[in-house]
Image (spheres, helix red, strand yellow):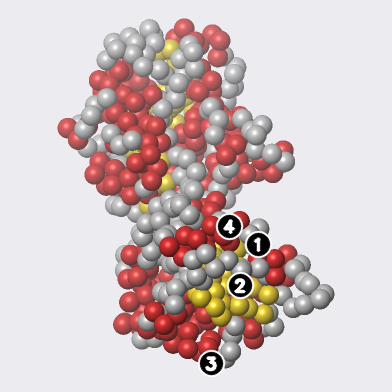
């Protein structure tokens, strides 16, 4: 459930060593034993057996603690009946501390080892069944150099399955950035807690299948150090958000029990955005939904979403009085979604500010409403709303809000979303692979569900409606945002599985799969 940075992991290691009294070498022993178990399980799963010789794995060993973990794994693999060969990236005499003690143990046990030399060649990759990457750990910074870079390139080209120790060498543990070169792992055995780089792209594609292995550092220790980044999942909903993702309902209820959502969405060119948002809201369980649209559109929308109430805005959004018309509709509603498909028009930022100031229920700003907000530059001069405010930007919209380039933003999604949420005291849902939910108190959540097929027009409109619906049902902003993005991704995964591909997925499929 916890997701940590490299610095937080170092603090956790030190806390357990100093305050709990578990020796560092015991943590290393636990880590290496976990790696060995995963190698054995991997070989069984893949059915890798040679009748003419035993299984044989090559372990690439760096000079730091990551290499020490690999040396422990080597001992346990030999004990389990798998042949191993150690290949040190640098002379092993340069190892220090607990890693050096593991080096000495491996040497006394007679485990075959050699030192990689530039241009030495001679590695018969085809004589091995797999490779363990124990070169560089979470403390590594920047692109691998020298023998590390050479070994990474060679093993990536070998065609052998690679199991990475804690994190693939060359991957930034905090941001998920792939340095050049970087190990492309079939599997990563991550110790104690997920590292942020493993749940953010491109890191999560680079790491392959990720297993979190316990090594003696407990979730309570992370909580005691006030680590506040989590991966969404059933345990997170249950233990952190105090929420049942199935949202069971009592029998003695009625439509008024589940809230009334106002959706301000759609225009002549983009009426479909309002349709998707409203229908998704109803499918997510709100009792009532009112869809506010320009008056001229109403005749063509009658019966399109028969469960929704249509509210005609005289003159449309460009009319100077339309903001007041929306504010009148807000009264008696439990939440409002503004933005999908409404377009841009003269004075629209002031239009949005009027609704911002006069609405007293939770407010979700999506799509064009976000662009209106970005034109306000620093909107800190706007009054603080009493009810929750949620922004649902994709990277381009977040770039406009923060004045950061998209590449800068994508390089550190969690921190950008967290900082913006704290600075402006609102909830941010930064969409994309590994959607980030950031709360005003600095707590962040990373979503593991979803697939590339969801990168299609209207998908965000569906999500906005889902968030609004959950807010109308009484969930907090944090609960509504987290549950909506998780269910949204699960729906996308369900559709892709049913179709056998994600290529043909369209936004309305998501609603049908909720």
Cα separation between marks 1 and 4: 8 Å
Q: Pick whichever, 435 or 96, lies toward us.
A: 96
Secondary element under disc 4, as helix, strand or loop, is: helix
Going 42% across and 19% down the picture, which residue do you hit? 342
Q: CA distance from mark 4 to mark 3?
A: 31 Å
Q: Earlier in the sequence, mark 2 or mark 1?
A: 2
Instruction: Point out which mark residue 156 bears.
Output: 4
Point out residue 179 in the picture as x, y percentages from the top left corner.
44, 52
Can you identify the residue that label 2 sits on? Answer: 58
Q: Describe the element under mark 2 as helix, strand or loop.
A: strand
| Structural crowding at the residue carrying mark 2, measured as other residues with C-alpha within 10 Å and reported as few (<14), some (14–19) or many (≥20) | many
**Can you name the residue that lies furthest to the bottom here?**
108
Q: Residue at x 42, y 46 (%)?
A: 436
Name the residue: 30% across, 52% down. 442
Q: Earlier in the sequence, mark 4 or mark 3?
A: 3
Picture residue at 31% right of the left edge, 82% below the top? 18
**Residues at badges 1 and 4 in contact (C-beta under 8 Å)?**
no
Residue 324, horizontal then vertical, whole percent: 30, 17
Tell me, for residue 160, which label it has, or none. Answer: 1
- Mark 2 vs mark 4: which is more N-terminal? 2
The answer to whether residue 494 is left or right of residue 352 is right
Q: What residue is shown with label 3?
A: 108
Task: Identify whether 97 is placed above or below 144.
Answer: below
Q: How packed is label 3: few (under 14 Cα within 10 Å), some, or many (20 or more)?
A: few
2 and 1 marks in contact (CB < 8 Å): yes
- Upstream in the sequence, badge 3 or badge 1? 3
Counting from the top left corner in percent of width and height, residue 60 is at 53, 71
Q: CA distance from mark 2 to mark 4?
A: 13 Å
Residue in front for this viewpoint, 325 or 128? 128
Q: Tell me if mark 1 has few (under 14), some (14-19) or many (20+) residues whose alpha carbon lies within 10 angstroms of its own.
A: some
- Give the CA separation, mark 3 to mark 2: 19 Å
């Amino acid at each position: 459930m916890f997701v940590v940075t490299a610095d937080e992991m170092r603090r956790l290691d030190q806390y357990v060593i100093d305050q709990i009294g578990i020796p560092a070498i015991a943590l290393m022993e636990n880590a290496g034993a976990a790696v060995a178990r995963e190698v054995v399980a991997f070989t069984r799963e893949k059915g890798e057996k040679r009748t003419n010789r035993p299984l044989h794995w090559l372990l690439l060993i760096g000079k730091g603690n990551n290499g020490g973990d690999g040396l422990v794994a080597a001992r346990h693999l030999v004990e389990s009946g798998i042949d191993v060969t150690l290949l040190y990236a640098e002379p092993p005499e340069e190892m220090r501390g607990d890693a050096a003690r593991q080096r000495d143990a491996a040497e006394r046990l007679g485990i075959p080892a050699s030192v990689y030399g530039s241009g030495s060649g001679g590695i018969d990759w085809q004589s091995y069944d797999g490779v363990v990457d124990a070169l560089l750990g979470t403390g590594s910074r920047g692109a691998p150099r020298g023998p590390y870079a050479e070994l990474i390139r060679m093993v990536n080209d070998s065609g052998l399955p690679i199991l990475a120790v804690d994190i693939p060498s060359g991957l930034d543990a905090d941001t998920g950035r792939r340095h050049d070169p970087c190990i492309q792992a079939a599997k990563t055995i991550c110790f104690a807690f997920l590292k942020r780089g493993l749940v953010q792209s491109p890191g999560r594609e680079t790491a392959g299948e990720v297993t979190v292995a316990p090594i003696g550092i407990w979730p309570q220790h992370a909580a005691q150090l006030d680590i506040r980044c989590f991966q969404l999942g059933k345990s997170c909903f249950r233990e952190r958000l105090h929420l049942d993702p199935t949202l069971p309902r009592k029998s003695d209820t009625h439509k008024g029990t589940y809230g009334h959502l106002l959706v301000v969405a759609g225009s002549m060119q983009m009426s479909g955005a309002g349709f998707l948002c409203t229908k998704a809201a109803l499918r997510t369980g709100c009792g009532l939904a009112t869809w506010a649209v320009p008056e001229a559109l109403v005749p063509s929308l009658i019966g399109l979403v028969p469960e929704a109430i249509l509210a005609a805005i005289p003159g449309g959004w460009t009319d100077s009085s339309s903001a007041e018309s929306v504010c009148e509709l807000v009264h008696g509603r439990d939440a409002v979604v503004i933005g999908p498909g409404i377009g841009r028009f003269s004075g629209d930022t002031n239009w949005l500010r009027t609704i911002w100031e006069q609405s007293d229920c939770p407010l979700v700003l999506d799509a064009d409403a976000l662009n209106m907000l970005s034109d306000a530059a620093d909107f800190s001069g706007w009054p603080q709303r009493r009810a929750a405010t949620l922004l649902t930007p994709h990277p381009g919209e977040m770039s406009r809000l923060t004045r950061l380039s998209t590449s800068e933003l994508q390089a550190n999604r969690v921190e950008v979303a967290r900082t913006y949420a704290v600075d402006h005291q609102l909830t941010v849902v930064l969409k994309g692979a590994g959607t980030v939910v950031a709360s005003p108190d600095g707590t962040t959540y990373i979503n593991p569900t979803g697939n590339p097929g969801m990168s299609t027009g209207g998908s965000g409109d569906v999500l906005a409606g889902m968030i609004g619906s959950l807010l109308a049902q009484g969930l907090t902003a944090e609960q509504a945002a987290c549950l909506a993005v998780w269910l949204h991704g699960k729906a996308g995964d369900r559709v892709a599985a049913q179709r056998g591909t994600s290529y043909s997925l369209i936004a309305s499929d998501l609603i049908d799969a909720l």
